[in-house]
Amino acid sequence: MAVERLLKDEATEEKGERARMASFVGAMAIADLVKTTLGPKGMDKILQSTGRGRSVTVTNDGATILKSLHIDNPAAKVLVDISKVQDDEVGDGTTSVVVLAGELLREAEKLTNAKVHPMTIIAGYRMAAECARNALLQKVLDNKDDPEKFKSDLMNIAMTTLSSKILSQDKEHFAKLAVDAVLRLKGSTNLEAIQIIKKAGGSLLDSFLDEGFILDKKIGIGQPKRIENAKILVANTAMDTDKVKIYGARVRVDSMAKVAEIEGAEKDKMREKVQKIIAHGINCFINRQLIYNFPEELFADAGILAIEHADFEGIERLALVTGGEIASTFDNPESVKLGHCKLIEEIMIGEDKLIHFSGVEMGQACTIVLRGASHHVLDEAERSLHDALCVLSQTVNDSRVLLGGGWPEMVMAKDVDDLARRTPGKKSLAIEAFSRALLAIPTIIADNAGLDSAELISQLRAEHHKEKSNAGIDVISGSVGDMEKLGISESFKVKQAVLLSATEASEMILRVDQIITCAPRRREERM
């Protein structure tokens, strides 16, 4: 019995087969969960939180779904992590990566039951992944040198990314928005410069791209509504010290007149500060904090537009875009970098007034204004658009493009199969399994569209055995179609990330042979 007392009470351990079973089952369950969101005919999930307000999210984005789940199974957590990393790294393919890893594990489970050692499977998977990647590298298209063709590639990639999301109805409109926004970045992957503002009302088609910057604020009373050639000072400073703060300060005085004196002194202090700010020669002052009515009055007299309480993201981005810096002291005006823009004016979007800065210093900045029926629609639209923007900005850097619609998986599977036939030993079983797992992605795309997947996949396989085939699944007509003609393409970088992350994650889970769960901490009984 001494052996069993090795672990603390209530700690549990699973050994060998059972541990492997537990991790396989958990990982496959996660894969099955997001499986139905894959592809153009994928469905959405509603996630309802148990917290206050019971907030509801409707989403199709694999990473968002998995991020919101609280999962107990350790292997499932690995899959959640790879989808998060995929989201941060390339932005799209979050569902595919989980599904592929799940399928690899499903195949591995069959092999372990047939008494193939996990290390053999891993070695096979390694070879297969390398082979699959080379297969893709041979087939990539690169139109970097021809701007027209490259732009159409980008449009196709954007439309392919958006077609599995809520924006699929208006995908041409949004693909155009996304491509324009990313091309303005001129090759930087810094998506900070693209601001997305969500305004409920209107329909999704009313969304538009605006060059320049829109700040979600109203212009104060009695201030100029329109400024040309603006010099902007972006600041983070307290502009509310012209009143005695009753709650915070204790002042002992012998008459009310003394209070008035203190107030007068504070007003003068404030006036001095405003004078210093005006001395910068600016005509627009944007502050992160409150501006009380007294300094606001002073600014209005000087003909300066003062904006208070600009939210922090807004203000950082504004400083970035106009080329200014956020200042908090105003003693030496020469050292402060001011922001510039050609025109500041007030615009109306729906019911709300916003402030529009056009002709900004940083030419690559722009704002996408999303309109939609409700918050849920807007949130989901923002996530989808964000996916598209990420993929496009990656593609602008690495301009290699593949066809989509299950075509890359078929290409990889074919090469991996050939490798399996040439490889001696048990490894070949694992390599074959890898190619079956790759085929699962087109299968699931077809299944989600309610098509006969077995029939379609075998047709595809036959097509791909001919030389230079562009065949993939055309979900709309429900048959095998030419992906090049349909303009369905994907970024090479996304596919490569999916392939490598999924392989590594499944390897990690395969290596497990024991799960030790630590004992829960007991709460001490309080007297």
Image (cartoon, rainbow, N blue to C red):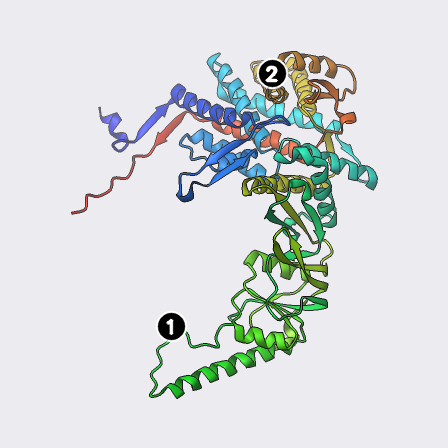
Q: Which mark is residue 432?
A: 2
Disc number at residue 167? none
The answer to whether residue 25 of the structure is visible from this angle is yes
Quarter of the image for residue 441 reads top right
289 left or right, relative to 515: right
Q: Residue at x 51, y 70 (%)?
A: 238
Residue 85 point in image, percent of width and height: 55, 38
Q: How many marks?
A: 2
Please tell me which residue lies in front, 492 or 177: 177
Dot label at residue 248? 1
Which badge, 1 or 2, is on the more N-terminal residue?
1
Establish if 370 lies above or below 68: below
Secondary structure, mark 1, is: loop
Task: Say which quarter of the image contains residue 323.
Answer: bottom right
- Against 300, residue 20 (above or below) is above
Position of residue 216 measured from the top left corner of the image (x, y, whole percent): 60, 57
**Mark 1 packing: few (<14 Cα in 10 Å), some, or many (20+)?**
few
Which three-letter amino acid code belongs to the residue tagged 2? Glu
